[in-house]
Structure formats: C-alpha cells, structure tokens
Image (cartoon, rainbow, N blue to C red):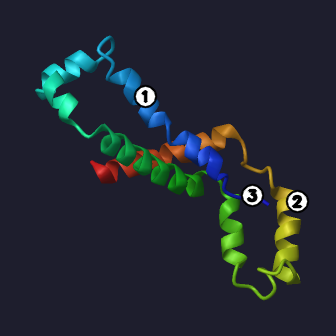
Amino acid sequence: MQSMNLLVIFLVSFIPLIIGFVWYNPKVFGTIWMNETGMTEEKAKEANLFMIFGITFFMSFLFAFTLQFSVVHQLHISSILKDEVGFAEKTGDAYADLNYFMTKYKLNFNYIKHGELHGLIASIFTKITII
C-alpha cells in the first residue's frame, strides 16, 4: 500500500533553502535584490537567520506534505475506507478490497510525468491563492 514518506518530505523541504542560497548569492541576483529592496549588509547582519530559515523550512515542509495528496492518488483510497468495519485491524472486506485494488492498479498513473502534472496544477492554484 502507498504511504507517506516523511523522510522524503523532510529532504524536499530543503529545496527552497538551496534555491535561495543560489538565488540570493551576490554573484547571481543577491546584489541586485539588495539594491532594489533597500537591503544593506548591516540590516542583513541584524536579521534573525534562525527564524527566517526555520520559518522557510517549516512552510516548505507544510507545502510538501500537502502537495503529496494532490500528486499521489493512491493516498486517498485508504482514507475512503478507513472507517469500514475491520479496516484498522487489517481484516474484513474493505481491507481485502483495498489490497486487491492496490495489487491490480497500484502503478496506474503512478509515474513521474503524471505526478509532475498534478504538482504543476496544485502549485499554480496554490500560488494564485497566495498572490
């Protein structure tokens, strides 16, 4: 059965930090960004970097955690059946049906391009609501 992989979600949450380290590097866009926003070296040194990076990581983790439900269809199936008799105990018809379904259809639409499509759609609509 498909399940969340919290280690992957944790690791993926570092991607915005890595991109930010490159993006805001003075050799890339850092100097331009500082000039355009009025940021100075003194202001940057006064900033609470632990809080900035911590909040960035936390929000990235939440986003990655939430995005998986749009990208991986199979995560929804067990949530539909979770309240059926015997499902939590891994017995009963619902659990047997889920095992049959996952054995037969597990890999349908479970490939990178389909996940990218859902990720793109979810990202666009998430960004639209933020903007």
Q: Please indicate whether residue 24 sits to the left or right of residue 47 in the image.
A: right
> Given the current orientation, which residue lies at the most extreme top position?
27
Q: Please indicate whether residue 124 sits to the left or right of residue 26 in the image.
A: right
Quarter of the image holding residue 8?
top right
Quarter of the image holding residue 81?
bottom right
Residue in the foreground of this view, choosing between 2 and 110: 2
Q: Nearer the viewer, mark 1 or mark 2?
A: 1
Q: Nearer the viewer, mark 3 or mark 2?
A: 3
Tag 1: amino acid: Ile
Q: Is residue 25 visible?
A: yes
Choose the circle earlier in sequence order: 1 or 3: 3
The x and y percentages for residue 47 are 22, 37
> Mark 3 — residue?
2
> Mark 2 — residue?
103
> Mark 1 — residue?
19
Look at the picture and state if 21 lies above or below 87: above
